[in-house]
Image (spheres, grey):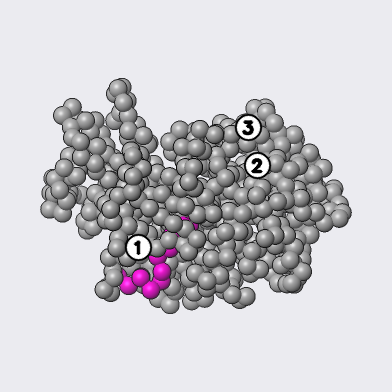
Amino acid sequence: MPSLTEVLRERAQRHPDRVAFHAGDLSVTYRDFDRRVDRAAAALAASGVGHGDRVAVLDKNSLEYAEQLFGAARVGAAQVPINYRLAPDEVAYIVNNAQAKVFIVGPEFVPVLDAIAGKLEHTRHTIVIGGHEGYEDYAAWMDAHDPGEPRDATDTSDVFVQLYSSGTTGLPKGVMLTHDNFLSVLPLSNDIWDIGDDTVLMVAMPMYHVAGNALTTCVIFDGITGVIAREPDPTAIARDIERRKVSHVFLVPVLLQFMQLIPEVAEADMSSLKLLLYGASPISDDVLRGAMRMLPTTRFMQVYGLTETTGAITYLPAEDHDPDGPNAHRLRSAGIPNPSCELKIVDPATLEEVPLGKVGEILCRTPQNMKGYWEMPEATSAALLPDGWFRTGDAGYLDEDGYLYIHDRVKDMIISGGENIYPAEVENVLMNHPKVTDCAVIGVPDEKWGETPKGIVVLSEDVPEKELIDWCRERLAHFKCPTSIERRDEIPRNPTGKILKRDLRAPYWQGQDRAVH
């Protein structure tokens, strides 16, 4: 199979005048995007980037982000997208860990670059989009290099992108995803997502996230038109859906929740949306029902996956999205495996497979599984087993129909008096209380039981602690129920909506002999 840059070349020859990307008011055809990628490749090569090297990018979603993704690949290198919400030292760690020779920075993040410029150990060129005193200007850097003869110095086994884990547990790890990884999953989008020549796909997820990265690549693979959302702004997204007649979009649950609260979103005509994909964090029944009311003609599809699996490995079909139908229980599931993916549930201690319906660690075997963690052979061998199975670190179970139900991260499991408690199960019960708008459950130290569950809640109005605990006790085994409740104004989450459990736990475990991580 051709590499992703060769796929781009073919799409540009087949549909030269079709719009590849809309980015704000700028629209670029496939012919022009392919030329821009050639120029990016020439600029990178002239800057010393070659096969196996890394190119770091710190920016919000942009056309430059996309052209550098394919430009790096065209010289056999790999892009390293960086979460723009990280602190300067965290950014420096990733750039140095990846040994990036070129570092491209968006205009809003020059202060971060200023703070770390003297700490970059391998970077030869720092380029600023829009230009800034003291750094090379992106446009001038690109224009100074003639693309020359077209090049495609890439094998499909080469790393296409190196995405860093969120770092919620320890230092972030560089997840190496190859062309082959993407080429194994992208063809599935045609059938499962019902993509056709007239599809307009919005890239609303950050490009530093596996979903945003995969969606950008999906646009090129399918030869369709993409709409790049600069940032996850609910109002801007709704207006661009109307303006560009977007047919397909991926949104995280927290964004769907915000969209239902904003009058300007309600005023936008989003009837062009054929499919809304959602995932990356759990969704409540209320948020899903509200989103379906907001978009009555849109099909909904949940997906579940990890950075290490090149994104989605399961999907919950649109036909299972009937909250009042006979299979309404499936809305609590993550759906069924992709056709190219095998799943099994094992005891995390022994790796022995457990019976249907029993909770254990989720393992998957698929060509989507990463190549490994960058320069971390021990972590790679611990995650990727010799027989091809990948340990997701997530806990869940399979039902008799093959649907996967996610309980929690294995590492977030609470062990109280020898009993295993999965916080997600308790969180689901708390979220069903009419006055709880958000919540998290963590394990806190207990002299008698080792640790016990603690509920942290956001409330629409005051509720006594005892009422919430009793609410749980009426619906769960008592050992699973919170022994204390704390009210907060908000639950800390990372950019994709995942709860920062480590941050919540840290104050309670200070000075303890051990901590739950």
Task: Answer left or right for 372 relative to 257.
Answer: right
Q: Which residues are magenta?
A: 312-323
Quarter location, residue 491:
top left
User: Distance of mark 2 from mark 1, alpha carbons?
Assistant: 40 Å
Q: Which residue is mark 1?
A: 402
Magenta stretch encompasses residue 317: yes
| Residue type pointed to by label 1 | Gly
Residue 377: x %, y % from top left: 54, 34
| N-term mark: 2 or 1 | 2
Query: What residue did someone put label 3 on?
Result: 96
The residue lying toward the viewer, choosing from 493 and 277, is 277
Residue tagged 2: 56
Foreground mark, 3 or 1, reads 1
Marking on residue 170? none
Q: Which element is circle 3 on?
A: helix
Instruction: Using a 10 Å C-alpha cutoff, classify the residue at mark 3 as few (fewer than 14 neighbours), some (14 to 19) or many (20 or more).
Output: some
Image x and y of residue 185, in percent:
55, 60
Q: How far, Cα to Cα, is label 3 from label 1?
A: 43 Å
Where residue 99 sits in the image (x, y, percent)?
66, 34
In percent of width and height, residue 278 lies at 44, 61
- Label total for image: 3
Identify which residue is drawn at 20% across, 40% down: 419
